[in-house]
Image: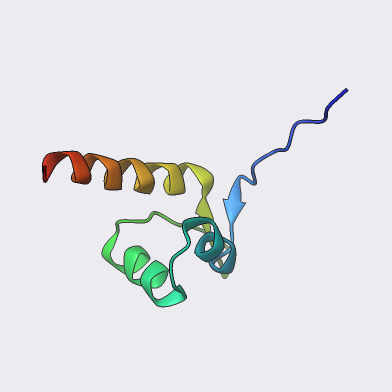
């Protein structure tokens, strides 16, 4: 029986950098401008998996509107 691979619910910034294949600076710029949502738990800033999916969907939508 195969065990499903679960996606993390929250990503640290370095993890999001790897998932999105973007630089650390770009990810922080996306967070600063509100294009990539984050949540805070205490002093830790995390990026929800849903925020990463939403950001990719936004990129796809923007790609379709510029054609």
Q: Is residue 35 left or right of residue 51?
A: left
Which residue: 39% across, 54% down?
Answer: 37
The N terminus appears in which quarter of the rendering? Answer: top right
Q: Quadrant of residue 32?
A: bottom left
Question: Furthest-bottom residue in view?
Answer: 25
Say left or right for 42 vs 6: left
Q: Quadrant of the C terminus?
A: top left
Residue at (51% x, 49% y) in the render: 48
Instruction: Give the image quarter of residue 53.
Output: top left
How many tags in the picture?
0
In this picture, residue 16 sits left or right of residue 4: left
> Can you say whether 61 is above or below 35 in the image?
above
Where does residue 21 sit, x and y in percent of width and height?
48, 62
Residue drawn at the location 58% of the way across and 56% of the way down: 11
Residue 44, image x, y percentages: 58, 67
Q: Residue at x 51, y 65 (%)?
A: 17
Q: Residue 30 location in percent, x, y?
A: 33, 64
In the image, farthest residue toward the top? 1
The answer to whether 26 is drawn above or below residue 63 in the figure is below
Between 32 and 21, the one lying in front of the other is: 21
């Amino acid at each position: 029986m195969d065990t499903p691979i679960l996606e993390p619910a929250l990503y640290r910034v370095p993890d999001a950098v790897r998932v999105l294949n973007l630089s650390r600076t770009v990810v922080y710029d996306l967070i600063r401008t509100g294009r990539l949502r984050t949540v805070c738990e205490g002093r830790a800033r995390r990026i929800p998996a849903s925020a990463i999916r939403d950001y990719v969907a936004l990129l796809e939508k923007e790609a379709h509107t510029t054609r």
